Amino acid sequence: MTTAEETAGGEASAWGEVTPDAARRLLIAAVEAFAERGYHATTTRDIAGRAGMSPAALYIHYKTKEELLHRISRIGHAKALEILQTAARREGTATERLADQVSSFVRWHAGGRTTARVVQYELDSLGPEARKEILALRRQCDAEVRAVIEEGVAAGEFDVLDVKGTTLAVLSLCIDVARWFNVEGPWTPDEVGALYADLVLRMVGVK
Amino acid sequence: MTTAEETAGGEASAWGEVTPDAARRLLIAAVEAFAERGYHATTTRDIAGRAGMSPAALYIHYKTKEELLHRISRIGHAKALEILQTAARREGTATERLADQVSSFVRWHAGGRTTARVVQYELDSLGPEARKEILALRRQCDAEVRAVIEEGVAAGEFDVLDVKGTTLAVLSLCIDVARWFNVEGPWTPDEVGALYADLVLRMVGVK
DNA sequence: GACCACGCTAAGCGCTTGCTCACTTTCGGC
DNA sequence: GCCGAAAGTGAGCAAGCGCTTAGCGTGGTC
């Protein structure tokens, strides 16, 4: 079995901002456990055990188990949004920027499958207010992709029937990578990213 | 709140084969509950309550809570496979048959979102042997779509770089509909089916 | 060297879980 | 009208859950 540092820590290293050290170790342990078994099937004892601590230690750094999920979700969505924004705001045509968005977003979902899985599939386990906050971040992700598609249409680069529906389909395609991607499978994250960028450009009818 | 009959029963009515009546009511109640809260967050008391029975009644018809999920998964996957096979074996060009596969598969995921959600997302909650059995059905679904894409390529109808990867992406796109589709949203299942058929034909490079 | 704030643990509380069991009700066959 | 099987109930068990609390060791301050 791999340690928390190897999987969740090594893959994203987006947890550097979490302090103190014990709180970060607990967070990384929670990401791992939630990704493997799901939020509800994960026990606080399991999380604490993976972080090499007693069950009670968890409650020094986090009020509840749900707060752990909330924190993970927020950091993960912020990272996802950052990826989409960075690609959207670089120089280049809409075609190039959309391809960049898709390939980097897919790479994140495939490579950081542990984190992405929790971020994308455990949303319903959050309480109402926390979910509302996360959904706002999600809408920002949506807007970031839609903007590039709209620019492509306006510039005459794309041929799209339904911008809203196509945006949704593009994001859906990328997100679902976190469900099926297998590190031991035949593809690397880079390969899936490249394949998906090509597929998405076909979907938007690049000429 | 809606009753079990209205949602899970009305949408698929694929549960007709389940007898006796009490066993079917419990199964439908379980589909509902699993779809709403997930397998692990659902209690046997909740399932029995939705079916209008006492908690103990569940164990007259099913050995464990997991057996319920297993049964649901098997019936659901059989239905999914049937949909893909029917579309694959009708008369027509590969283009027409692929479009039919996608639109009917998507319609099932959108319209029967309750069932589809359980079938597609609660697989990991099954035990090892049960999961193996279900995964075999899943591979058959994959093969059914891949066959049509391969025929399209052979007939010169499609232009595909990576048949295996594209097949996976097509299925992934359809399946993820169960995650985001909302009955109160702006689209009907038919509309999403039509949109997605168009997008998929673009993905395979229909000329 | 007495002090105390801090990070952590051992033990365990109250509650819910999946599941069982002794018992009652229902009903077709004779 | 009696009987046995099948279907369902109410109460509850053992285990595990999220979370709390009393107390311990340790490092910095005066």
Image (cartoon, coloured by chain):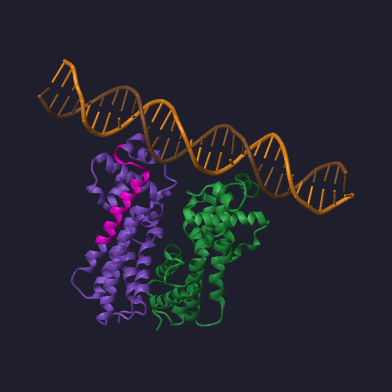
Chain colours: A purple, B green, C orange, D brown
Residue D11 position, x and y percent, is 62, 35
Up-down relation of residue B169 to residue B54 (above or below): below
Query: Is residue B199 depicted above or below B136 in this figure?
Result: below
Image location of residue A137, percent across then percent down = 30, 60
Q: What is the tally of numbered marks visible in this picture? A: 0
**Compared to B53, does A60 lie above or below?**
above
Q: Is residue A114 above or below residue A65?
A: below
- Which of the two residues, B14 or A36, is positioned nearer the viewer here? B14
**Residue A79 forms part of the magenta stretch:** yes
Quadrant housing residue A53: top left
Q: Residue at x 28, y 49 (%)?
A: A10
Is residue A92 magenta-colored?
no
Q: Which residue reaches farthest bottom?
A: B207
Left or right: residue A119 compared with residue A155: right
The front one of B55 and B153 is B55
**Residue A13 shows in the view:** no
Identify the magenta region.
A60-82
Quadrant containing the N terminus of chain A is: top left
Instruction: Give residue B56's quadrant in the image.
Output: top right
Left or right of B151, for residue A126: left
- Left or right of A151? Residue B190 is right
Note whether residue B121 is visible: yes
Q: Residue at x 42, y 64 (%)?
A: B180
Depth check: A82 or A180 in front? A82
x and y percentages locating residue B81 in the rendered image: 55, 67
